[in-house]
Image: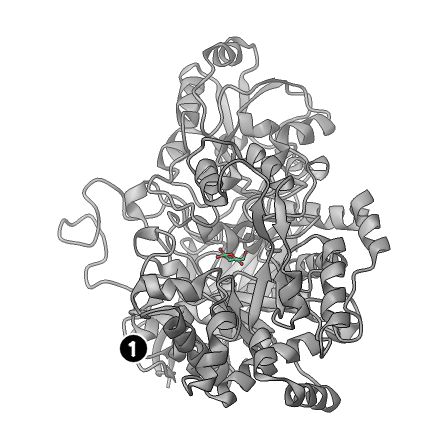
Amino acid sequence: MKLNDEQIKFVEELLGKMTLEEKVGQLNQESTSIVGGFDVPFEELIEMVTDGRISQEEFGKIMASAERDYHEDEIRAGMVSSFLDNDPRKINELQKIAVEETRLGIPLLIGFDVIHGYRSVYPIAIAEAGSFDDELMEKTARMAAKESRAYGICWNFAPMLDVARDSRWGRVSEGPGEDPYLASKFARAKIKGLQNGNESGECYVAACTKHFVAYSACEAGRDYNTTSMSLSQLHNVYLPPFKAAMEEGACSAMASFNDLNGVPCTVNSYTLRDILKGEYDCKGFVVSDANGIKECVVHGIAEDETDAGVKALNAGLDMDMGTHIYYNYMVQAVKDGKVSMETLDDAVRRILSVKVWLGLFDNPYVDEAVIAAYEAGIPESHKELCLRAAEESVVLLQNNDDILPLNKDTKFTLVGELADRADEVVGAWSLGWDVADCVCVKAGLEAAGAKFDYYPVCGPEDEINEKELKAAIDSENNIVIAVVGEYKSMSGEASSKADITIPGQQRKMLQELKAAGKTVIAVLMNGRPLALGWEKENIPAIIEGWHLGIQMGTAIAEVIFGDVNPSGKISSTFSSMNGQEPMYYNHPNTGRPGSKSKFTSKYLDAPVDPCFPFGFGLSYTTFEYNDLKLDETDDEIKATFTLKNTGKCAGTEVAQLYMQDVCASLVRPVKELKNYERISLDAGESRQVTMSLSKSDMGFYDNQGKYVFEKGLFRIYVGGNSRDTLMEEIRLD
Ligand code: BGC
């Protein structure tokens, strides 16, 4: 985010005209309050939906008829800066109050969670990152920006950049996986896609990188839990995608709920002031996560709400989401000298700058004709992009004896309740879609002209329907495609799980089908890497379909019939058993790496190796890597190798380059991803490929948070996943 001189002058003049109250008002975000219109208090309603007394659908219906307070009076008083909502016509009404009825006419910043698409939902982030396609990631973000801006949302609470190494944590679904390099590339692509329209003249929004920081390192994978780590780990693993996003000019960041080494990120001046606004030179602002400031009292880091507000604002937290603490107490805190005017001005300046950068002072309103057009249907080009993203994100995990692709004339049986759930393909944190646009697996197969019988048998939470299972078993069809996995509500926020195997009786269903002699093809629909030890041993073909968005069914059918040759890779390690978590490929070496010998780092009852390693994914063809050679120039290492398509059809391979710093002053990871490239080859074609690794990327952060490069021996690996690689050594002096 960059402002020109005229815009900077505008912000300064506006700031100069503001009263203390108006300044504090600019730090306040409101959302619609539910004030009644139903029989039980709102809090109880939330409990009822949480404990299952009412379904999500019933809850939705009650909410739709609830009475709401849009805080018009506070807006009119100039005490609201931002509003969290997605009703475009209401947004226009509220904006009109802010622009026409307040003393200074400062427009509202409308924020909302648009994580993987709005109307046109594309794959969840953990899936899309597995496409290893930066251009695609940028394009999908641009589409999301266009759609959100059309609905009046000009500030997206995305991208979510939490590097996640523990699949028990439900929010792994929202982020780009376990690798800091891939996450940083994802971050750059998303910021460009969301924000670059500011220069190119296309639609754009302000990005909000989240959750800052180390939220995903929560102990035991339990959401909101405490995190503690060395400075080296913080800087090497969790901060890099945020650094990359800030280098691309990201407009804002959201402070995470967790405490980091004892200091909640909401009041953490080291992460907010020293790192984000200092070292990374963030010119935008920081918003708390929902209710975050108030929670500092519960954390036991602030005595009361005033204390929490003072600590947060002084630490560099500019906008309060959801608690009214700034609104209620910060005027007095400034008068009492607990917060300086300089600190307040800095926060207000940052927020106003984003509003100016967004052009809100020139054009604050939503064009209702554009909304009407979207309401009538999403553009074909958006559907096509969602399909391409789904096709590139599907991962073929197993294909014994080349069972797949199927011939279109093969009659099969389809089982699994999820196969027929169009409302489940969109994954967690998707809020603007219409089920009429969503293609479930069953519909995708039907549209492809497949011949099959369908028996739901069971879903993630049901008992097996024995009659349907018997019908599937008694059928003459030998091949059974089983769509199994998780509902979208089983991942995302507050959805941590201690058991990450395929939930409910779905595995039992697979076991019964296998025992009956069926050839089972599993299509997984899930938001987290599942522990697939049993499935790997027993199910000959496994397609990882994640929650692929509105075009899920079409993409899965294309893969099943070979119209699309899968090229996606997993952006996160898959373990075999629950107890192996957290499991990630880029772990530090131990002095006793796991081996056959007893006194090494391993389990007595589980393998030490992953079920499927990071970067893994099969194709209907095969690729061979040969002749790795390294060359050194002043600035970089060039790795040259031959990649050959050794199979019978054309395909795309994601070639990956890793490095290992063999001996350093701190224990370094056994491998670190440093580059990747999607390479398409015809059957039999071979190509000499050169991938480079800049020397400036070969260092690491030490325990003072300082980046150091240490000369010595390095290993360079290339391959199609993090496990199966060629290796050469090089010594840098
Ligand atoms: C989540 C954020 C989200 C915010 C606003 C919070 O509960 O942690 O990711 O952006 O709500 O909806």
Residue at 31% across / 70% down in the picture? 303
Q: Nearer the viewer, residue 491 or 91?
A: 91
Residue at 29% across / 66% down in the picture? 300
Name the amino acid, label 1. Answer: Ala
Q: Nearer the viewer, residue 663 or 31?
A: 31
Residue 640 position within the rendered picture, expressed as x and y whole percent measured from the top left: 53, 68
Question: Where, quadrant-wise, is the C terminus in this rendering?
Answer: bottom left
Q: Nearer the viewer, residue 410 or 299?
A: 299
Identify the residue under disc 1: 664
Q: Is residue 470 above or below residue 82?
A: above
Which element type, helix, strand or loop, lies under badge 1? loop
Residue 135 position within the rendered picture, expressed as x and y whole percent measured from the top left: 66, 62
Q: Is residue 222 left or right of residue 101?
A: left
Q: Residue furthest right?
A: 369
* Res 499 visible: yes
Residue at 27% across / 79% down in the picture? 665
Residue at 70% across / 40% down in the picture? 434
Q: Is residue 714 above or below residue 211?
A: below
